Amino acid sequence: MGDTNNWPAPKAPAPGEEGYTTSSSLSFQEREKGNAPNADASVLAALDEKNPDAAVTTDSLTSEHTLIDGAENEEYVTGYKLALLLFSVTTFFFLLMLDMSIISTAVPQITSDFHSLPDIGWYSGAYQLAGATLQPLTGKLYTRVSAKWVFLFFFFIFEVGSLICAVSQSSVMFIIGRAVAGVGSSGLQNGSLTVIAGAAPLDKQPMYVAYMMAFGQIGLIAGPLIGGVFTQYVTWRWCFYINLPLGGLAGIFLAFMHVPDQTVKPQISFKLLREVIPQLDLIGFAIFAPSAVMLLLALQFGSSQYPWNSSTVIGLFVGAGVTFPIFLWWERRQGDEAMLPFSMVGRRIVWVSALYGAALMTSIFVGAQFFPIYFQSVKGVGPTMSGVNMLPSILSSVVFILVSGALLGRLGYYLPWGAFAGAATAVAAGMISMWGPDTTTAFWIGTQILYGARGCGIQIGLVALQNNLPPAQSALGVAFLIFCQNFSAAVFSVVANTIFQQTLQKQITILAPSIDPAMALAAGGSAEAVRALAPPDSPELRGVLMAFSKAFDTTAYLLIACASLSFVASWGMGWIDVRKKKQPEKGEA
């Protein structure tokens, strides 16, 4: 046939013309060996069908070493380079999870330094608002541009936000820093998963993701302990300074590494950005962002600054309710070019995985938020010791994550792990709702160990999506999953706080009638403040402790509901073997 490299590139057939195909390209190994045929459209139509959404035309096959944009890329990272990549991404993920929870024990001192108690809701609200509203847009960006550079871009923004928080001289400056960090976080959680998805084959990903998730859980749950140590012995500003050296080191490693994408993408350039920006569905984002912001603001204001029946809160709820249907109409009109394509979101595996992940993650976030309150207000320990008392939950969760990640690649089926995680977490949450002032140490330790079984399900939604979606949609699907998890956690954290406060007020009236319920709420959850409400060893103090315990127990009912929902949803994710399929020997059909 002669030297095919000297053939002129044939004109690509337009959609609808003879020879046009939407099949994906040859595998990376075949292209590297030079086995790619170059011009015959009938051969193109017979190429592998792993990525039916990627368009391939004959003019993209003019060279035997050409990688086709949008085609599945099967180039993977191995050896020490893979170890460095996993170290970098795991460090990023750890810092991200740490940043979500480390602020909890630093807030009292921050409000004292800035004399800004009314701003307390914005310290976490600004972060959640920025992160949740931008999440779907980042998924769209990851499908168009190299995951490595998109990830580093968002991490740079996250680092800038952390620096602003660390050097803040006022409450307003601190809130701005939290918002900037939230913008950066919107592209990091799904970005970490997207980077690993491109760097490792599917059958290896569960184990690598398990390592990352395990360290993320350590950061999420140990955050209050670390924040308490910094605030008590150094300064609360180190809660944010810590992101700079660790993140900078990991960023340097990642910047100088070659990180393959799931699909072949053109090199980053200003020309590429000019082409990509019109494809990001910015109109859809402009409609979605106000809807999400109004909903989260309504929940934020209604739980702290305004009554639920105030015109401000009702107006925000109405605004969100009117804007969201407009967003849905626009997304349906955009079709596959939408920020959240209905053709993808409407698939059972996508919305069921998102529902499962959101329910399980909500139970994790709410538990991490209220466990310290129980140990401090009811059991009477300090911030540092309350973090120590949570170690059984932390360690068992890490063990369950690592074990499930290792065995998933060997046993193959993810559904049993998801169902077990939901069921065990629901049972553990039921036992948690029985905690009281006289609960024995053995009981709350054993309960937390069982509660750690949630670790088996943390990555199950991700595994289900990556094994059912084509590579071209994987990043978008992961972004949708992470968005549902974070948005649900933000919403139900406020719901849990409302349940806790209303139950506490009711129980204080019943169990300690001489104590003003407003004073109990104003006291907060620290051991000293709660015990200062009534004389030591008095029946009233016993009633106060019991009221706090019952408020905690009622909040645990939300954990039971979320974990039970995740158990039910797990059965809809499909019975699929994710193990690497054995390749047929030569001569076999």
Image (spheres, grey):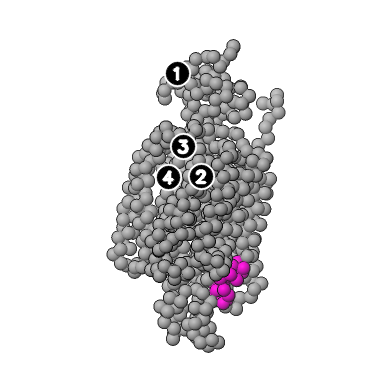
In which quarter of the view is residue 522 placed?
A: bottom left
Give yes or no for contact between labels 3 and 2 (Cβ–Cβ under 8 Å).
no
Q: Earlier in the sequence, mark 1 or mark 2?
A: 1
Inspect this view and state whether residue 424 appears: no
**Foreground disc of the pair 1, 3:** 3
Q: Compare residues 506 and 265 and report the one nearer the observer.
A: 265
Name above or below for residue 257 compared with residue 247. Answer: above
Q: What stretch is highlighted in magenta?
A: 374-390
Depth check: give the residue in front, 319 or 519.
519
The amino acid marked with disc number 4 is: Leu
- The quadrant of the picture occupied by the N terminus is top right
Which residue type carries mark 3? Answer: Arg
Residue 94 pos. (x, y %): 57, 54
Label number found at residue 137: 4
- Tell me how far mark 1 sits from mark 2, CA to CA: 37 Å
Q: Do the residues labelled 3 and 4 touch (CB within 8 Å)?
A: no
* Disc sitting over residue 580 in the figure: none
N-terminal label among 4 and 2: 4
Looking at the image, do the residues carrying marks 1 and 3 touch, with CB atoms under 8 Å apart?
A: no
Please identify the residue farthest to the top as the structure is shown: 2
Q: Which of marks 4 and 1 is nearer the N terminus?
A: 1
Earlier along the polypeptide chain: callout 3 or callout 4?
4
Task: Give the spatial CA distance, label 3 vs label 2.
Answer: 15 Å
Element marked by disc 4: helix
State the residue in front, 422 or 136.
Answer: 136
Q: Distance between the residues labelled 4 and 2?
A: 16 Å
Say if the magenta span includes residue 383.
yes
Which residue is found at the position 47% from the left and 70% from the top?
108
Distance in Å between CA atoms under marks 4 and 1: 34 Å
Distance from Cα at disc 3 to Cα at disc 4: 11 Å
- Residue at the spot of label 1: 11
- Ranked by sequence position, the earlier of labels 3 and 2 is 3
